[in-house]
Image (spheres, grey):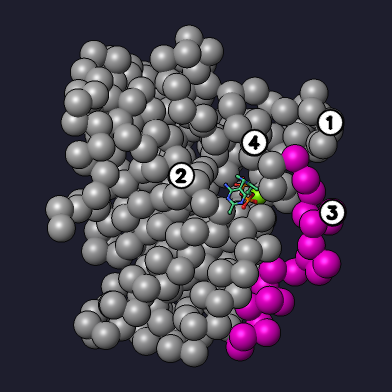
Amino acid sequence: MTPDLRKGLLTKILLIRRVEEAIAERYPSNQMKCPVHLSIGQELVPVAISSHLTRFDHVYSTHRCHAHYLAKDGDLKAMLAELYGKETGCCKGRGGSMHLVWPETGMMGSSALVGGTIPIAVGSALAFSRDKSKNVAIAYFGDGATEEGIFYESLNFAQLKNLPVIFVCENNQYATYSHQSSRQATHSITDRAKAFGMFSQIVDGYDLDASYLAAGQAVQRARAGNGPTLLEYRTYRFRDHVGPGEDIQVGYRTQEELNSWKGRCPVETFLIGISAEERKVLESGIREEIEEAFAFAEKSPFPDVAKGLGELYAPA
Ligand SMILES: Cc1ncc(C[n+]2csc(CCOP(=O)(O)OP(=O)(O)O)c2C)c(N)n1
Ligand SMILES: [Mg+2]
């Protein structure tokens, strides 16, 4: 990775971090009425993945979708307006935080149904394969989604048909308030892919080089017609399962565990490594972009209630 590329990726990670911190800060004012599942702590993974994608590659995401959307160059103003329930939002204010879409850059959608978008990504890959295009589809999901039957059906079908899809599991150890060890009979998610004969790999989701390399190899494999890959990224969320806090009082994880992951935070390492002057310039540019996007969201109009249901279904 060239120094310029590394800096570009870290700047993107920093932008996503600051966007979500700003959401967390403003959330208590109750202007964003939807639940928010923040990705703070997990941003490196989608940035590493997206760095290998074109706007013609398709990304499908989850309830925790802000970082996936921004890493795939989804429009920031339209994202924040969506969180504020405004007509200018990427789903015209009908979807909220868990339903972000920006087809112009290949961010094809996200869903609150755990595991729900995994087969849709496979369908997209099937279309790419039939069209003989070189495009790839990405299915993002959490460790919890691997407990859904559709996960196994999707893996089987993708491998059977040799489809250009990459299953990106963001294993943050928890599904809501339950640790993986209390939910799953075996812990190796990669072993489940191996059961279908699929290439799979565990990756440190806090290591930019390793994450970038693994993503690049998987994308290359898919583009070359060599089929799907499952990447299990080990990562961690710093905030609540849902909401702006840190979930320590709930009792399912300890402050020590959270601190140990924060101690490896790629954003902090990056900021420590640059000069104070450079940091100031970078942070103020990002702050300006974020302030502008929030102002846009706050000033935008709400949807017309009379047209409320009119936008939900495609015309017959
Ligand atoms: C089909 C379905 N079952 C249950 C839920 C409730 N639910 C929302 S998020 C979540 C946990 C998901 O955990 P994981 O897949 O690991 O993603 P993470 O929240 O850790 O990013 C659950 C059970 C849901 N939204 N959809
Ligand atoms: Mg999880």
First in residue order: circle 4 vs circle 1: 4
Work out whether mark 1 precedes mark 2 in sequence or the reverse, and give the earlier one: 2
Q: Which residue is mark 1?
A: 251
Q: Secondary structure at mark 4?
A: loop
Which of these two is toward me, 264 or 227?
227
Compare marks 4 and 3 and give the one earlier in the sequence: 3
Q: Amino acid at mark 1?
A: Gly
Residue at (45%, 22%) from the top-left corner?
Answer: 33
Whether residue 98 is visible here, answered yes or no, is yes
Q: Position of residue 14 (x, y in %)?
A: 46, 34
State the CA–CA distance, disc 1 to disc 2: 25 Å
Q: Nearer the viewer, residue 231 or 92?
A: 92
- In this rendering, position of residue 245 left or right of residue 219: right
Where does the image place residue 167, in percent across and percent down from the top left?
A: 51, 68
Does dot 3 land on a helix, a strand or a loop? helix
What residue span does the magenta drawing correspond to? 177-197
Residue 294 appears left or right of 262: left
